[in-house]
Image (cartoon, rainbow, N blue to C red):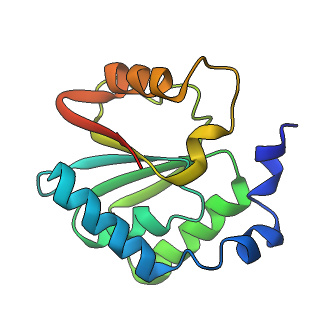
Amino acid sequence: MAWYQEWFDRDEYELVYQHRDEREAEQVVDLIERLVRPAPGSEILDVGCGRGRHARVLARRGYRVTGIDVAERALQIARERAEAEGLHHVRFLRHDMREPLCRECFDGVVNLFTASDFSRTTPTTCGRFRRWRQRCVRAAGSCRIF
Protein backbone atom coordinates (compact mmCIF):
# COMPACT_ATOMS: atom_id res chain seq x y z
CA MET A 1 0.00 0.00 0.00
CA ALA A 2 1.31 3.46 -0.87
CA TRP A 3 2.19 5.78 2.02
CA TYR A 4 -0.50 8.32 1.13
CA GLN A 5 -3.20 5.67 1.38
CA GLU A 6 -2.35 5.21 5.06
CA TRP A 7 -1.07 8.61 6.25
CA PHE A 8 -4.32 10.55 5.93
CA ASP A 9 -6.21 8.01 8.00
CA ARG A 10 -3.79 8.29 10.92
CA ASP A 11 -4.39 10.30 14.09
CA GLU A 12 -1.00 11.98 13.63
CA TYR A 13 -2.33 13.72 10.52
CA GLU A 14 -4.63 15.80 12.74
CA LEU A 15 -1.63 16.90 14.84
CA VAL A 16 0.51 17.92 11.89
CA TYR A 17 -2.25 19.90 10.25
CA GLN A 18 -4.04 21.26 13.31
CA HIS A 19 -3.36 24.82 12.07
CA ARG A 20 -5.61 24.10 9.08
CA ASP A 21 -8.96 24.86 10.66
CA GLU A 22 -12.43 26.00 9.60
CA ARG A 23 -11.39 29.66 9.58
CA GLU A 24 -8.53 28.91 7.23
CA ALA A 25 -10.87 26.91 4.97
CA GLU A 26 -13.23 29.90 4.78
CA GLN A 27 -10.31 32.11 3.72
CA VAL A 28 -9.27 29.68 1.00
CA VAL A 29 -12.80 29.52 -0.38
CA ASP A 30 -12.96 33.34 -0.26
CA LEU A 31 -9.86 33.36 -2.46
CA ILE A 32 -11.31 30.80 -4.87
CA GLU A 33 -14.49 32.86 -5.20
CA ARG A 34 -12.52 36.06 -5.85
CA LEU A 35 -10.22 34.48 -8.45
CA VAL A 36 -12.54 32.05 -10.22
CA ARG A 37 -16.01 33.54 -9.61
CA PRO A 38 -17.97 30.30 -9.91
CA ALA A 39 -21.63 30.70 -10.80
CA PRO A 40 -24.11 30.14 -7.95
CA GLY A 41 -24.94 26.47 -7.60
CA SER A 42 -21.92 25.31 -9.63
CA GLU A 43 -20.93 21.67 -9.36
CA ILE A 44 -17.41 21.53 -7.94
CA LEU A 45 -15.07 18.57 -7.55
CA ASP A 46 -12.64 18.72 -4.62
CA VAL A 47 -9.75 16.40 -5.52
CA GLY A 48 -7.95 15.06 -2.47
CA CYS A 49 -10.66 16.41 -0.15
CA GLY A 50 -9.45 14.67 3.01
CA ARG A 51 -11.77 15.42 5.92
CA GLY A 52 -13.83 17.78 3.77
CA ARG A 53 -13.11 21.20 5.28
CA HIS A 54 -13.15 23.05 1.95
CA ALA A 55 -15.92 20.93 0.45
CA ARG A 56 -18.16 21.74 3.40
CA VAL A 57 -17.44 25.47 3.14
CA LEU A 58 -18.26 25.36 -0.58
CA ALA A 59 -21.49 23.46 0.16
CA ARG A 60 -22.47 25.98 2.83
CA ARG A 61 -22.13 28.68 0.18
CA GLY A 62 -24.56 26.93 -2.13
CA TYR A 63 -22.28 24.95 -4.43
CA ARG A 64 -22.93 21.28 -5.15
CA VAL A 65 -19.72 19.54 -4.15
CA THR A 66 -18.20 16.13 -4.66
CA GLY A 67 -15.07 15.39 -2.66
CA ILE A 68 -12.82 12.48 -3.60
CA ASP A 69 -9.96 10.91 -1.68
CA VAL A 70 -8.32 7.52 -1.15
CA ALA A 71 -8.39 7.72 2.66
CA GLU A 72 -11.58 6.01 3.82
CA ARG A 73 -11.36 7.13 7.44
CA ALA A 74 -10.89 10.74 6.34
CA LEU A 75 -13.91 10.41 4.07
CA GLN A 76 -16.00 8.99 6.90
CA ILE A 77 -15.06 11.95 9.09
CA ALA A 78 -16.01 14.29 6.22
CA ARG A 79 -19.39 12.57 5.83
CA GLU A 80 -20.10 12.74 9.56
CA ARG A 81 -19.21 16.43 9.77
CA ALA A 82 -21.34 17.28 6.71
CA GLU A 83 -24.27 15.34 8.17
CA ALA A 84 -23.88 17.08 11.54
CA GLU A 85 -24.09 20.43 9.72
CA GLY A 86 -27.12 19.32 7.73
CA LEU A 87 -25.35 19.81 4.40
CA HIS A 88 -27.22 18.10 1.58
CA HIS A 89 -25.30 19.29 -1.48
CA VAL A 90 -22.01 17.56 -0.69
CA ARG A 91 -20.93 13.96 -1.12
CA PHE A 92 -17.67 12.18 -0.43
CA LEU A 93 -16.41 9.29 -2.53
CA ARG A 94 -13.42 7.02 -2.34
CA HIS A 95 -11.63 7.50 -5.65
CA ASP A 96 -8.02 7.65 -6.82
CA MET A 97 -7.17 11.14 -8.05
CA ARG A 98 -5.02 9.70 -10.82
CA GLU A 99 -8.17 8.64 -12.66
CA PRO A 100 -10.85 11.12 -13.73
CA LEU A 101 -14.18 10.45 -12.07
CA CYS A 102 -16.54 11.20 -14.95
CA ARG A 103 -16.90 13.00 -18.25
CA GLU A 104 -17.97 16.65 -18.32
CA CYS A 105 -19.87 16.43 -15.05
CA PHE A 106 -18.41 19.38 -13.09
CA ASP A 107 -18.25 23.13 -13.55
CA GLY A 108 -14.96 23.31 -11.71
CA VAL A 109 -12.24 21.29 -10.03
CA VAL A 110 -10.09 22.36 -7.08
CA ASN A 111 -7.01 20.67 -5.73
CA LEU A 112 -5.72 22.28 -2.58
CA PHE A 113 -2.34 22.30 -0.89
CA THR A 114 -0.22 19.16 -1.18
CA ALA A 115 -2.82 16.76 -2.55
CA SER A 116 -1.27 16.89 -6.01
CA ASP A 117 2.16 15.62 -4.92
CA PHE A 118 1.31 12.11 -3.76
CA SER A 119 1.69 10.12 -6.93
CA ARG A 120 4.76 9.91 -9.07
CA THR A 121 3.05 7.74 -11.70
CA THR A 122 1.87 10.69 -13.80
CA PRO A 123 4.41 12.94 -15.53
CA THR A 124 3.48 16.21 -13.83
CA THR A 125 0.82 17.74 -11.67
CA CYS A 126 -0.10 20.16 -14.45
CA GLY A 127 -0.44 17.29 -16.92
CA ARG A 128 -2.73 15.44 -14.55
CA PHE A 129 -4.96 18.43 -14.13
CA ARG A 130 -5.07 19.12 -17.86
CA ARG A 131 -6.50 15.62 -18.17
CA TRP A 132 -9.00 16.32 -15.37
CA ARG A 133 -10.02 19.55 -17.11
CA GLN A 134 -10.41 17.84 -20.47
CA ARG A 135 -12.44 14.93 -19.11
CA CYS A 136 -14.36 16.08 -16.05
CA VAL A 137 -15.02 19.79 -16.44
CA ARG A 138 -17.72 21.21 -18.67
CA ALA A 139 -16.55 23.51 -21.46
CA ALA A 140 -17.11 26.75 -19.55
CA GLY A 141 -15.71 25.42 -16.27
CA SER A 142 -12.52 26.05 -14.37
CA CYS A 143 -9.75 23.87 -12.94
CA ARG A 144 -7.51 25.33 -10.23
CA ILE A 145 -4.63 24.04 -8.18
CA PHE A 146 -4.01 25.96 -4.94
Instruction: Please count the marks in the image.
Output: 0
Q: Position of residue 21 (x, y in %)?
A: 52, 79
Image quadrant assignment for residue 105: top left
Whether residue 69 is visible: yes
- Name the outermost residue toward the right: 1
Picture residue at 52% right of the left edge, 29% below the top: 125
Q: Residue at x 31, y 48 (%)?
A: 44
Residue 95: give x, y in percent of width and height. Answer: 60, 38
Q: Residue at x 47, y 73 (%)?
A: 82
Using residue 49 as the reference point, say whether residue 121 is left or right of it: right
Q: Is residue 65 placed above or below 76 in the rendered structure?
A: above
Q: Position of residue 41 (x, y in %)?
A: 17, 56
Vertical side of 67 occupied by 55: above or below = below
Instruction: Return the x and y of residue 10 as percentages of the image width and height.
Output: 82, 64
Left or right placement of residue 101 versus residue 116 in this view:
left
Asked if 50 appears above or below 136 in the picture, the reply is below
Residue 87 appears in view: no
Judge left or right: residue 25 versus residue 39.
right
